[in-house]
Amino acid sequence: MIESIKAYAKINLHLEVLNKRPDSYHNICSIMAKINIFDLLQLEGCELCNPNTIDITIRCIGGQNAAIVKELPIEQNLITKAIRLYCSTAHIGSRVTIAIQKEIPSGAGLGGGSADAAAALMLCNNVFNKFSHNELMALAAEIGADVPFCLNGNIALCEGKGEIVTPLKKIPLPDAVVIVFNDVHSSTKEAYTALMRSFAPVLSKKEAVLSLWDKSDVGALLNIFKNDFQDIVFDNNPQLREIYRTLQDFAPDFIHMTGSGSALCALFHDIGKANEVFLTLKPHYSQVFVSNLL
């Protein structure tokens, strides 16, 4: 039987970049939420072999972003990194074949590579059962800053470099989501560099955000949410500011760029309105999605 896992995309409802860390990362304060757009990973083969052998095959079986998988060298794929880290840490050799249906675009700030890596860790652990959830979280943090969140619940506060994940209760946020991605690839490294953060501690809006969250004060939260990357990325890519203005014309309840870009996310309480926006914008941009918060 082929085992499969959905690797869900994420958006950042709130993203503060605080200060540099000695390990070359930055401390962040972010609210991340999974949305119902996903890559599908299937474990087609997984067997033990010589402890010195870790043989990985990744097959692309379709999806509107299949070209990402086909064009990316296998050793640069985070799925490969996740499987190698899992097996080497567990001191096992294996031959693993993963098939992927790739729907999440790359370079959009939607966490597709991180979600795939987290799914690969879970698939391996379902077979070999070598690690606890906390141990998987530690492995995830070695792969990338967003991978620990992808192993957890649907919405969470993420701190540190992203590895400190605190699940949050569900509150009545506008949960119909329109995503617009127009093939502008924003460099995460360049975005962090452009912020010019120092090592000095920076005060964040964490306490204010959590207080409003505890009160389920959605209106105030939507006003306080921010993305520290947005203005810098918009300045470097004026077309993103134009997409933002276009989305504003539809009067969403909330709109922000996600991650370090470059996808724009508009949230609506009314799924009917979100569907109308989707149908209106779809002919004009490379990729437009309508989805919902999980």
Image (cartoon, rainbow, N blue to C red):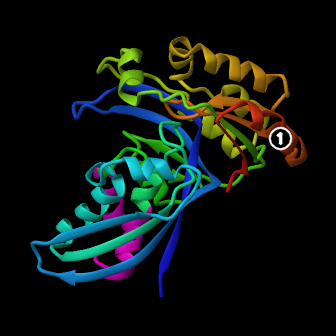
Residue under the point 84% across and 22% down? 249
Residue under the point 54% across and 16% down? 237
- Say left or right for 269 vs 50: right
Q: Furthest-bottom residue in view? A: 1
Main SS category, magenta section: helix
Whether 119 is drawn above or below 258: the answer is: below
Residue under the point 20% across and 72% down? 90
Q: How many marks?
A: 1
Dot 1: within a 10 Å radius of its alpha carbon, few (fewer than 14), some, or many (20 or more) residues?
A: some
Q: Which residues are magenta?
A: 119-142
Residue under the point 35% across and 72% down? 97
Viewer can see residue 131: no
Is 87 included in the stretch rendered in magenta?
A: no
Give the camera-side residue of 200 and 5.
5
Query: Residue 291, position in %: x, y?
Result: 72, 50
- Say left or right for 283 vs 144: right
Query: Residue 106, position in %: x, y?
Result: 48, 42
Viewer can see residue 83: yes
- Say left or right for 20 vs 113: left
Q: Which residue is mark 1?
A: 279
Is 134 included in the stretch rendered in magenta?
A: yes
Whether 274 is drawn above or below 200: the answer is: below
Whether 1 is drawn above or below 220: the answer is: below
Q: Amino acid at mark 1?
A: Leu
Query: Residue 89, position in %: x, y?
Result: 19, 66
- The secondary element bearing badge 1 is classed as helix
Q: Quadrant of residue 192?
A: top left
Point out the image quarter for the C terminus.
Answer: bottom right
Query: Residue 252, position in %: x, y?
Result: 81, 32
